[in-house]
Amino acid sequence: MRLRSQSYLAYIVLAAAALAAVLITIRVFGSIGHALKAKLAGGTLPLAIATASLPNATVYQDYSATLQASGGTGTYSWSVASGRLPGGLTLSSSGVVGGTPNSAGSFSFVAKVDDRDGQSVTSWFTVLAQGPYGNVGDPYADEGGRPDGQAILVSRCHKLDSHKSYRLAQDVASRPDAVCFQLNGEHLRLDLNGHTITGRIINAGGDASGTVIFNGTVTCNFNDHGGDVGCIKITSSAPVSAGARIHHLTLHNGGNAGSRALHIDWPAPAPASGFSVRVFNLSGDTVAQPDVSRSYLLSIQGGGLTAEIAHNDLTCSGGANACQAIMCFGCHDAKMHDNRITMLPNTTSDTGRALLFDSADNGEAWNNLIYVNNNRGLRIRDSSNVTAHHNAFKNITGRAQDYVAAVHLGDPDRGTNDLHSVIENNTFEVDDGRVLMIRNGTNVVVRSNTVTCIKTCSGQLASVRSPLANGTTSISILSNPTASNLPAPQTVVEAGAVVTVCKSGAVIGPGAITRTVDCP
């Protein structure tokens, strides 16, 4: 009996094991079947873009990043639905963003992926292309490709004559606050040959046409006490027969009473073609100047003057009151692009301005990288016809301070700025600051910008201020949907101000607010 009981027990154990195996097999194949059915039906495995962001790029360096998708059926096919990549980069059908970027700035685009069955999805991406900034690269690229073999070698400070080419043979120095080189006349070329000049370079007020200064370091210690001067000072009132070039230099003025690195004053009509002056690949910074009314790095002015200011690397000290990194005052046209400007956190009574268009007839700012901190990144004042696009404004802070914003518009001395300006396709990285502030300005469109949050994320999209006496404040804020990344309300409209808003977050205030469903 015991043997028979043991045999029955063994049969029961074997039968239970067999049944368990069958149940497991049914469950596995059933799950596979359900998954296959779901995939064929496109129900639970929809097409999706798996890549969240793209890495930064460096100008003139090879770049490659692959977009990834999931779900859907068959082979994926990628394309750009809208926006643009940095020049030199493309998106292949296989999802590779590759190439060699040739321009700096923040570039946003919408990537689209299609599968074999016709499903498609899109996602927004931004590529930040950085550099080259400052005194880097080939200084002879714009100067015939090589040093001038016929240049006069210079080994001491003295006057330089027009229609001649000079090249430093060694470092040269005067007193730091004195003039080292005086330029007498037009078509004068000074190659620093990688050396350092201690002291100032000025012209004598004659024709500055064709002036070229490049390839080295200029350092001085000069306090202008309110005058329009600098370590390099170019002044001219003659017609511009040939543009001037100031490039591939490191500039530093150690003065602390209104010191400037570069000052150009040339109130003359532009040449028939090209720019009156090109200022590019400069590195510079300011020292603390808390007691002056204004601090400057690069100041350029003159009615009729046209200027290109590009690929510079500039830093405004937090102790430099009202530091203007790049100012074009009274210019007929100014192009500011591909600059990196670091505004250190301000510790003075007045905040700085990274890019300033003041009393300008026309202007354009693009591909600039600006670290705002509690300063102003872009200032458009008493000017018109300025477009700012594809710039990256980083670390926007200081909303509690009056007039502080990444973009500050209007506020003229009297009347109203008829700005005719567009702020579009920029990226704004906001901590506790505001993206835009406008007062006494009209005819402004702010559209298609990207807003992201960092740190406290307590910032604001726009402050539309009450107009000053006898003035008007009005603006259109259109199609900035990522403004909703900021806490509501994103825009405040003060009494007497007017705003038209569409797809840009919540707007409140006693001012006149027109909301539209379809962005005009």
Image (cartoon, rainbow, N blue to C red):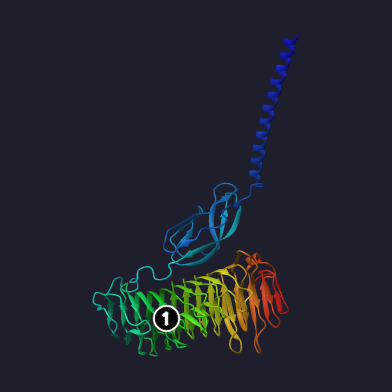
State which quadrant residue 505 falls in.
bottom right
Dot 1 crowding, Cα within 10 Å, few <14, some 14–19, many 20+: many
Q: In the depicted view, which residue is nearer to us: 220 or 464? A: 220
> Quick one: which residue is furthest to the top in this view?
1
> Quick one: which residue is furthest to the right in this view?
1
Q: Position of residue 143 (x, y in %)?
A: 32, 74
Q: Residue under circle 1?
A: 262
Residue type, numbered disc 1 = Leu
Does residue 301 sit above or below 517 in this rendering? below
Q: Position of residue 199 (x, y in %)?
A: 35, 81
Residue in the picture at 71% in, 79% down = 512
Does residue 83 sit above or below 467 in this rendering? above
How many marks can you see?
Answer: 1
State which quadrant residue 414 falls in.
bottom right
Q: Is residue 162 visible?
A: no
Task: Say whether residue 15 is left or right of residue 122.
Answer: right
Q: Quadrant of the C terminus?
A: bottom right
Q: Position of residue 208 (x, y in %)?
A: 36, 86
Q: In the depicted view, which residue is nearer to us: 379 or 331? A: 379
Q: Position of residue 509 (x, y in %)?
A: 72, 76
Q: Quadrant of the N terminus?
A: top right
Q: In the depicted view, which residue is nearer to us: 340 or 67? A: 340
Does residue 17 sit above or below 496 in this rendering? above
Does residue 185 sit above or below 491 in this rendering? below
> Quick one: which residue is furthest to the left in this view?
150
Where disc 1 sits, the SS reads strand
Residue in the picture at 64% in, 64% down = 485
Q: Is residue 223 visible?
A: yes
